[in-house]
Amino acid sequence: TQIGQVFPYPYATAAEIEKQLKPTLEKLQQLTIMFHRQLQIFKARENIVDYTDLEHLTLEILAPFNEDTNKRHPSPAAHYYQKLFKEVLVDEYQDINEIQAAILSWLSRENDPGKKGNLFMVGDVKQSIYAFRMAEPSLFLEKYQAYQKDEDGRLIILDKNFRSRFEILNFTNFVFERLMDTTFGE
């Protein structure tokens, strides 16, 4: 059966294996937390930031996390950029990650329900290639599906191509419609 392929052991056996692994996994968790703390101390001492740090620092500047409300709220910097930018244009939206999406929402007026949105995104989920950088194509798909229903935005299909012949596009679409969908290969 399909379920047997996913869960090869009976429940009782799997529970016993998990019980035996728990101390090892807890130690691994502690080691990971200690490594992360030491890495942060080292980077602070050496004045080093990496790309991920820049993303998190940017988000914290635009929308600091409030412990009392358990939410992020726009900072004066976010308000400044929301007023400054008439439009926020994003190419290759299928290759952004969750923190980048949050940054874009605080730079644009996407989080301001009283104002008209100004975030314009272009992308093609079939072209997502940055999973190794934590790209989250599902963010694009969520927007695509919501905008099809005119929820929180408008979907414009850019389906004209002036660089390829109809026959080539038709054949390519025929093949890839069968290979790429939400249930196969995400």
Image (cartoon, grey):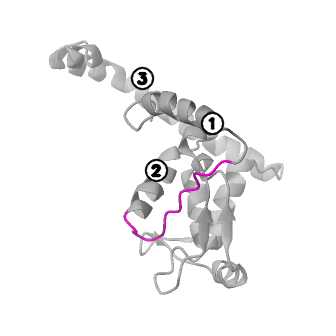
Q: Position of residue 3 (x, y in %)?
A: 21, 19
Residue appearing at x 68%, y 65% in the figure: 89
- Magenta-drawn segment: 149-161
Viewer-nearest of discs 1 and 3: 1
Viewer-nearest of discs 3 and 2: 2
Residue appearing at x 64%, y 40% in the figure: 133
Does residue 118 appear to the left or right of 12 in the view shown? right
Quickly name the residue at label 2. Answer: 141
Does residue 11 appear to the left or right of 126 in the view shown? left
Quickly name the residue at label 3. Answer: 24
| Residue 45 visible to the viewer | yes
> Mark 1 touching mark 2, by CB under 8 A?
no
Residue 82 occupies which quadrant of the picture? bottom right
Q: Position of residue 156 (x, y in %)?
A: 53, 62
First along the sequence among labels 1 and 3: 3
| Residue 131 visible to the viewer | no
Q: Position of residue 144 (x, y in %)?
A: 46, 56
* Circle 3 SS class: helix
Q: CA distance from mark 1 to mark 3?
A: 34 Å
